[in-house]
Image (spheres, helix red, strand yellow):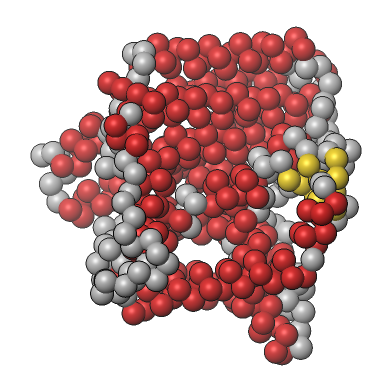
Amino acid sequence: MAHGIGGQKDLPIPLELTVAGAVAALVVSFTVLAVAWRTPRYDADRTGRPAPAALRRLVASPAFFVVLRAFGMVAFAYTVMVAVLGEDTLINPFFGIFYVLLWTGFVPASLLFGPAYRAISPVRTINAGFARLTGGDSAVGVFTYPARLGMWPAAIGLYAFVWMELVYPFATELGPVRLWCAAYVAAMLLGGALFGDDFYAKADPFEVFSTLVARMSPWGERRGELVVRSPLANLDATPVVPGLVAVVAVLFGSTAFDSFKDSTRWVKFIQGDFVQDHSLAHVANNLGLLTFVLVVGGVFAAGTMLTGVGPDQPRRALPGQFAHSIVPIVIGYFVAHYLTYFLEVGENTLIQMSDPFSNGSNWFGTANWTPSFFFAYHPTALATIKVLAVVLGHVVGVVAAHDRAIHLLPRRHQLTGQLSLLVAMVAFTAGGLYLLFSA
């Protein structure tokens, strides 16, 4: 229910006008960029200024690194404890840790502090410990990570997570979720042992997600030094690797499906006379999730490839070159869709964490907290935030795509070549707003 607070009736203006205004904002933004933005402005190798000296010393210090990794291991140990010893009930904090803090919590953490999951990654710490015990090097591994794999393993891992969350019928039973987490840890430790830290940077679904979100933070790195620069400059430095388009398609498509499956039309379809068999409903949800991911990826790929290119520019490379422009859209849609979910269920998770075994304990002093339901009493404010998040995410995406187009495309195609991508962005904006407010 936390997903659906703030619907069509709570919009300050009708949904049709909201969508029209959002599309107009997108088109106007593109028009202004076409007139005023004629040369590339973002270059991660040249932009940004060094962070304050004290902050650079803190971030570079071994003690800071150890504290972060220790925090990650303590959090990991606590999660294992409640997963193994906790009761198989919804008040077990394990579910909130897995579905809320791990999935939505790292979005604001990465926006504020940079690649947060990488900083505390327990699987990196465990792998480093194994390497130290065996005399190996955790950064290198036994083999070189195959470049052709890129981020495809992360895309598969992210799809497995959203499938567990949105489609799997036993997603709130302790056994299956615990098994999923055990398989994730095992796969990460094996991959790290074989391919070193490069495996985590490209194949760990949660680290890849956190790092992509961190591209919109003000913190960057230049020649090993912490710098402060425009988030768009950080975004422009996103490595173009195989599987990047698949990652953003899974993130965006799954969030869109999460909205769609709560819509009146889909609920009636699943619960109606046409789909009465539970197995058929499960198949329908599986096909729905897969369809949304494929449609998002297909629309984006078509929008980038339907443009003029130079003689040495293969069209099939364009989706990867422009995939970074989807990251702010994903962030905007995450904020719009999961804001109340993160605040309300996340706060309830912190309450449950103080009493992990439901015996009246108060380990962290949060057991007596009362969740705040501010947006439940201010649905119009929530609806406005949703619209602004979606529109702002798309506008920033258009800016990122425009700068990349000027840098990449031949001069005669720099503006006209963006029209097909603009059409795709408009479709994402209109469709995203409709899905958000159709529940």
410 to 333, vertically: above or below: above
Judge whether residue 334 can be spotted in this image. Answer: yes
Q: Position of residue 347 (x, y in %)?
A: 38, 52
User: Residue pushed farthest bottom?
Assistant: 134
In the rendered image, which quarter is residue 99 located in?
bottom left
Q: Nearer the viewer, residue 178 or 268?
A: 178
| Horizontal side, residue 349 vs residue 301: left or right | left
Q: Position of residue 138 (x, y in %)?
A: 73, 76
Image quarter where the C terminus lies is: top left
Residue 66, horizontal then vertical, whole percent: 69, 72
Vertical placement of residue 245 versus 180, above or below: above
Does the rendering let one see residue 290?
A: no
Q: Position of residue 290 (x, y in %)?
A: 41, 46
Q: Residue at x 51, y 15 (%)?
A: 23
Above or below: residue 86 compared with residue 311: below
Give the position of the N terminus as an image quadrant: top left
Relative height, residue 114 to residue 266 (above, below): below
- In the drawing, does residue 138 fall left or right of residue 354? right
Residue at the spot x=44%, y=71% of the render?
79
Drawn side of residue 401 relative to residue 285, left or right: right
The number of numbered discs placed on residues in the rendered structure image is 0
94, 192: nearer the viewer: 94
Does residue 388 appear to the left or right of 200 in the view shown? left
